[in-house]
Amino acid sequence: MPYRPAPRPTWADVTPRAAWLSRRALLAGAAGAALAGPAAAKLAAQPSRYSTDAEPNTWDEITGYNNFYEFGTDKSDPRRYADALTTDPWAVKIDGMVDRPGTYDLSDLTKGVTLEERIYRFRCVEAWGMVIPWIGVELATLLNRVGVRPGAKYVAFETLYRPEEMRGQQRPILDWPYREGLRLDEAMHPLTILATGLYGEEMPNQNGAPIRLVVPWKYGFKSIKSIVRISLTDSQPPTTWNMMQPREYGFYSNVNPEVDHPRWSQATERRIGAGVFGGREPTLMFNGYAEQVAGLYAGMDLAKFY
Amino acid sequence: MALAEAINRGARRLPTAAIYAAGMVPLAWLVWAAATGGLGIDPVKEMEHRLGLWGLQLLILGLCVTPLRRYAGVNLIRFRRAVGLVAFAYILLHFLVWLVLDMGLLWQQALADIAKRPYVTVGMLGLVALMPLALTSNDWSVRRLGAAAWRRLHRLTYLAALAGGVHYLWLVKAWPVEPFLYLGAILALLALRLPARRAATAR
């Protein structure tokens, strides 16, 4: 599917009536939550046809098993240490080949958008998987708001660098700040979202608060967390893991059972939460999203562009 | 050397069975924790990693015995067999957890990983190197092989420890400190043996 520039929307276009209603629902939900206690969801979100039927992992699993090296390399470190991160106020700098570059306050950036619940499979490059009920908005919606200029071919993302709050950044484990990137057609694909919550709650810090990328057909490290910068470029941006080990982590990093990581097989995966005797299940091409995204890579040698 | 003497006196009173008993305590804890959900969100990896790490730690402990005697006058040689066998037990369990619980007995994929993935290959090499040592860790084998041949055979420990250290370093992502510390300790303990070896060949 070749990338077609979307028609330029006006602000009226992107703040439809439904959005206003959903914001009212959100307020009503918040009032309800105050009465009903913590069980009620805080973020109102529309269901989506892109959601999987698979049973989501538990809140505890999703928020207690994270690769977020900004808080430490152990998977339990982020839950332990991410409290130190302040996410309010939060600004996202949008620059490069856009019509309206600038530093946007997060609340302005997402003002009026309809949040959707996207229950996605999530596949880590380490050969484990989860199912996560994200809440977010299509990245394309926000990119259209700022206006993508015609020559742009890639989108680059950057995570916050704040070592005094992100203790993992005090050591040069990775070349901070964490950077990721997508081809523009990947970024504009309706499956690609910027997530601001999960399970009806605001995004927990350890999962990449307040706003993170989710690209469900790629290995998890592509879904960059705690984003402070989005740049539109005409050349492929450098990405953190690729810079560190180009043989192991390609720019594309699409989930592909036939292309192994040099140090381990990607043919199967363990489902987190399946228990001690859960065993393995086969990994699906593009993490099960082949029907929607295979066309993006038509004619490409995926063993070469891994 | 008063401290060394005190340790030696205490050690003489300690039966070797105490080492086996103490060595099983972490395993008992692990089984209990696994059964009661105490191993966190990914119990399989947790078991696998802990068993491997304990095995490596015990191998390193075993490598300390000779330098401790030579350089500090502390004689723990009586316990070395027990330490080695407990190390082997943990490393074997580490392998079995990988094969049965992690790989889910997918034989083809497991064999392919052993052949194709360098860190798995190196780990396997370490385990295989330990097998003849575990099998000959009894008085009968020492008598049968003769002390000199037995000692030569048991230098495979060096290979196994090195393989374990490399295995650990090779499997991690990014550059955390711990695997470097383990490999560094192993290299240092092996280096301590070089002067003695050189002196022995010069004689």
Image (spheres, rainbow, N blue to C red):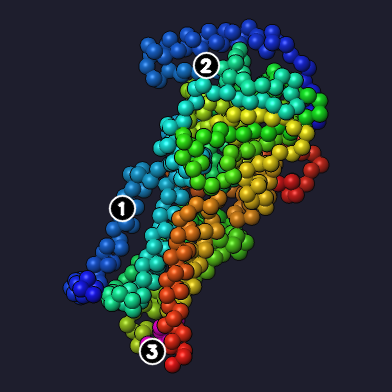
Q: Amino acid at mark 1?
A: Trp
Q: Is residue A13 above or below residue B16?
A: above
Q: Is residue A6 above or below residue B171?
A: above
Q: Please state which of residues A285 and A3 is positioned toward the viewer in this rendering.
A: A3
Kindly identify which residue carries mark 3: B146
Kindly identify which residue carries mark 1: B29
Chain letter of the residue beneath label 1 in the structure image: B
Chain letter of the residue beneath label 3 in the structure image: B
Magenta span contains residue B151: yes
Q: Is residue A17 visible?
A: yes
Callout 1: helix, strand or loop? helix
Q: Bounds of the magenta span?
A: B147-153
Is residue B15 shown left or right of residue A273? left
Kindly identify which residue carries mark 2: A44
Same-subunit check for callouts 2 and 3? no
Q: Tell me how far mark 2 sits from mark 3, CA to CA.
A: 77 Å
Q: Please state which of residues B201 and A49 is positioned toward the viewer in this rendering.
A: B201
Check if mark 2's residue and mark 3's residue have beta carbons within 8 Å. no
Query: What residue sits 53% from the left and 26% below the top?
Result: A210
Is residue B139 shown left or right of residue A235? left
Picture coordinates of residue B73, whole percent (x, y)? 28, 77
Q: Amino acid at mark 3?
A: Gly
Q: Tell me how far mark 1 sits from mark 2, CA to CA.
A: 44 Å
Picture coordinates of residue A3, whole percent (x, y)? 79, 28
Same-subunit check for callouts 3 and 1? yes
Of the 4 image quadrants, the one containing the C terminus of chain B is bottom left
